[in-house]
Image: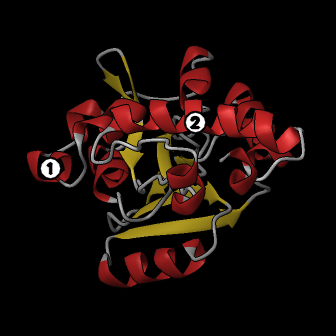
Amino acid sequence: MKRSAVRLAGAGGGLVLALAATGCSESGSDTTSADGKISITFWGWAPGYADAVAAFNKSHPDIRVIYQAVQPGAKGGYQKMLNVVKAGNAPCLAQVGYETLPSFAAQGALKDVHAYRSVQEEAEFPPAAWNAVSVGDQVYGAPVDTGPMALFYNKKAFDELHLKVVVGSLVSVVPLLIAFLALQRFWRAGMTAGALK
């Protein structure tokens, strides 16, 4: 596989949810033509990928990404990916979720793309996102999305129960979970927050 094809794995951070280089096939499905144009295959399932690939192809005339929609990971996509890796004809790029990436790495289904990541690309995501696509010192993909996680609570019910919520820190999750468990006990007994006064 040419270095520029692998560079796409790092540069295409906006292209896939959890991009992983699955070891471009040596059998010819990912190739460089006589005119130097690189053709690589990308498997994924998230909405908008076909449009993203079309936009990428339009703005990168020397690289042609061939998008192939596959079933979502747990619905057969991951098994299909592992099967083609074992058969030696894997696509060059594939969507792999953060939670599944270590398993793929342990099975030898991914290539380390750390050397192709630029300082600029590294700065586009926080270290936690890069850690999610890394196992040890090896980087197996490019993080593409990270999102805020939120836990909503009923302020009125918490106030009535005199439950304090600490905000602005991950530490605030622990008191919320403890309060939730305490509330569950009352809700299961059929009580409302107002009945606890």
Q: Is residue 186 visible?
A: yes
* Viewer-side label of 1, 2: 2
> Residue shown at 58%/43% (left/top)?
97
Amino acid beneath label 1:
Ala
Q: Is residue 88 left or right of residue 171?
A: right
Left or right side of 193 for 23 = left
Front residue of 63 and 166: 166
Q: Where 144 sits versus 176, above or below?
A: below
Residue at left offset 89%, top offset 46%: 190
Q: Is residue 30 visible?
A: no
In the image, what residue type sits under mark 2?
Ala
Q: Is residue 112 above or below residue 183?
A: above
Which residue corresponds to mark 1?
123
Distance in Å between CA atoms under marks 1 and 2: 37 Å
Q: Position of residue 42 (x, y in %)?
A: 57, 57
Picture coordinates of residue 13, whole percent (x, y) = 35, 57
Query: Label for residue 179?
Result: 2
Foreground pick, 161 / 24: 161
Q: Which mark is residue 109?
A: none
Residue 35 location, quadrant: bottom left
Label 1 packing within 10 angstroms: few (<14), some (14-19), many (20+): few
Quarter holding the N terminus is top left
Q: Residue 62 in the image: x percent, y percent?
A: 32, 71
**Crowd around label 2: few <14 · some 14–19 · many ≥20 (10 Å):** some
Q: Secondary structure at mark 1?
A: helix
**Helix or strand or loop: what does disc 2 sit on?**
helix
Q: Position of residue 185 (x, y in %)?
A: 78, 33
